[in-house]
Image (cartoon, helix red, strand yellow):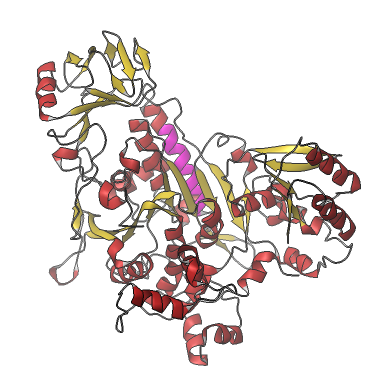
Amino acid sequence: METDNQRFNATVQPNSAFLAELKEKLPEFFTRENSFDLEKFQAALKEKNVSELSEGYQLNFIGKDYARRQAGEMPTTVIVPDEDQNNGAGKNSQNLFFTGDNLEVLRHLQNNYQNKIDVIYIDPPYNTGNDGFVYPDSFEYSDDKLKEMFGMNDDQVARLKSIQGRSSHSAWLTFMYPRLFLAKKLLSDTGVIFISIDDNEQANIKLLMNEIFGESNFLTDFIWEKTQHFGRQKINSYNNADHVLAFIKNSVQEGSLAETLVEFEKREFEDAPLYNASNNISTLEFPYGSVKFNIPDGEYLKTTDKKYELLSPVVVKNGKNINNFKLRFRSRWSSRTISKELEKGTKFWIKTQNFAVRAIYGNGKISTEAPKQIIFTKNNSTITKDRFGNHVGTSENATSYVKKILGGEFFSYPKPVSLIEYLISLYYKNHSYPNDFIVLDFFAGSSTTADAVMQLNAEDGGHRKFIMVQLPEKTYHTNSDGSEVPTKGGKAAYEAGFRSIDEISRERIRRAAAKIKADNELTLPADFDGSFKHYRVVKPSRMTLERIEEFKPDTDELVLDTVTAFSSDALGVAGNASGEQTVLATWLAKDGYAFDADIQKIDLAGYQGNLVENNRLYLICENWGSKCTEKLLNLLGTHALNLQAVVIFGYSFNLNDLRELENGLKQLDSNVSLIKRY
């Protein structure tokens, strides 16, 4: 018997994902049989006087239909929680780290993170032939199946399968298409995606993004100076820059990045700290209403940072000071300068109870909120300075920093934290600052994006959250005699004790967080999040799948130990997750629940069920019986338990117990649905 997702994937066509999206946006053009009514659609175009284009162009490549089909498939993996991490250092964290194929992770996130990601930054393989990029698809379909699904001939099938392991443009585009398609669906309506790339694939990725996101949603092509060491170059030219393409999810959406991007190099939108350790101590007086506060309303008599001393009480109401107050610290401005700046329209901002005051320049044109609109041309924008006027780092700066953090040079050409900080800081959620939005990077690498998010939060007291995804690419390969040999680019990491790239990524986050805490001991917000919850996305073993295929739901025979087969031990990964915890984590994502959903154990005559958010009951393990059904029906009948649905793992229930539960639920006055999954 096939799993539910396998059965779904067998029906997927290259245009399935597109039609699903079209039905969501334009359901009125679909028939009761879910067919698209082309005539009705064409009539609507004519009624609205919309011209139909008879000519146009698009990006075509070998494998495009295969890539489009991948974009519409359901995940065939399970989500295995790392219980050691999630009940330890990451217990209270809202950050997430996924180890696994990023295409599968993006599929899993479609239900619980669709339209919820605000910023995506990725630094994908550049496909230069020297970056280790190998197309990872196993092409599990037979040649005959490929011909049938995509209308290919023998030569085309051979060409499609020959792209494995080669740095061809088709291979790279086939790899990128489904990931970018699914990434777009995760972005919020005001979201933005930044993609680092070099000249080798810049033209192709621009065309691909135009197709997926639409040309009108292209924002700009940033140019980043990646190196200042050029070495020997060909024909008296050199390439010292990379591109960072920026696309908006929806350019016509109110509050989109078209309205909320901020260019920090322009003085009229700059904010900067007043504290300067080299200046003398000054006493500054701030008039009524001149300061915006991001702390609870109330009266404050002292600060949490010894660098700042309150000389008079300050009363905060509705986020502003309603009295004059004096603050003493090493300031680069005097009270006289503050008075002049206030006349120009400059506002001041205190984000935490440490009272580290910052200036928000405005020339009389903006309020304490972020600017509501700024016009960006679509010409290339060179990234040279960060929001404080400092030069954005180069790859050499990043290499030095990572080496200092991790103790070795494990990555080639890493991105500097300052570059990612710059890009993330361009996004303002609902015109407010600091931010609490979500940042996704599904090519995590050395986790520079996570580092940047944490540093920004430490700096301004924000609550941005990160989601990192990294393939567990090994730093070694195993010889026929069982001996391990480091890979070409993995020797340093292997010798340092790292067996896969994702291990390095997570260790970078831990060490970066420790450094941030040490560097900001007095000013760090109390709720600073320097950890993460960890999940592995793993394909079940062939033996488990074969057992599932043998299962017949119309008999009393169960698949023995099916639940146990999904434990971390059975799947060959670390983390101490039981099979029940794996199945539950996978289903919670499928049903749209966040990874920090409230889960309580409920006793049903000795059977332990999982009650999620007090409205859905998951029954996964075996040993369900009549007494369990009786107890559940009694709780529901007396309204001691109120449920929308009961979800069961079909392999754990024999036919008689399943029918008894199904009939009992039907007899209840409350409409509780029974969902059976395989």
Q: Residue furthest top?
A: 312
In the displayed image of the protein, which residue is found farthest to the bottom?
154
- Determine if residue 389 is in view: no
- Reply above or below: 630 against 55: above
Is residue 568 rendered to the left or right of residue 118? right
Residue plotted at (63% across, 74% down): 10
Instruction: Say which of 564 and 341 sits in front.
Output: 341
Residue 193 horizontal/vertical position (percent): 36, 55
**Is residue 509 on the magenta stretch?**
yes
What number of labels is visible?
0
Horizontal and vertical percent position of residue 601: 74, 38
Residue 350, image x, y percentages: 29, 24
Q: Residue at x 68, y 65 (%)?
A: 4
Q: Quadrant of the C terminus?
A: bottom right
Rendered position, 83 above or below 283:
below
Question: In the depicted view, which residue is nearer to us: 554 or 567?
Answer: 554
| Left/right of residue 115 with respect to residue 265 in the rendered view | right
Residue found at x 19% / y 49%: 384
Question: Magenta segment: does it hold 624?
Answer: no
Residue 129: give x, y in percent of width and height.
37, 71
Q: Where 517 sits versus 42, above or below?
A: above
Q: Is residue 110 left or right of residue 340?
A: right
Quadrant in which residue 382 is drawn: bottom left
In which quadrant will I find the N terminus? bottom right
Residue stretch rendered in magenta on the structure? 501-515
Out of 345 and 237, give the one closest to the viewer. 345
Decide if residue 23 is in sight here: yes
Magenta portion: prevailing SS class: helix
Instruction: In this rendered view, identify the residue nearer to me: 71 or 477.
Output: 71
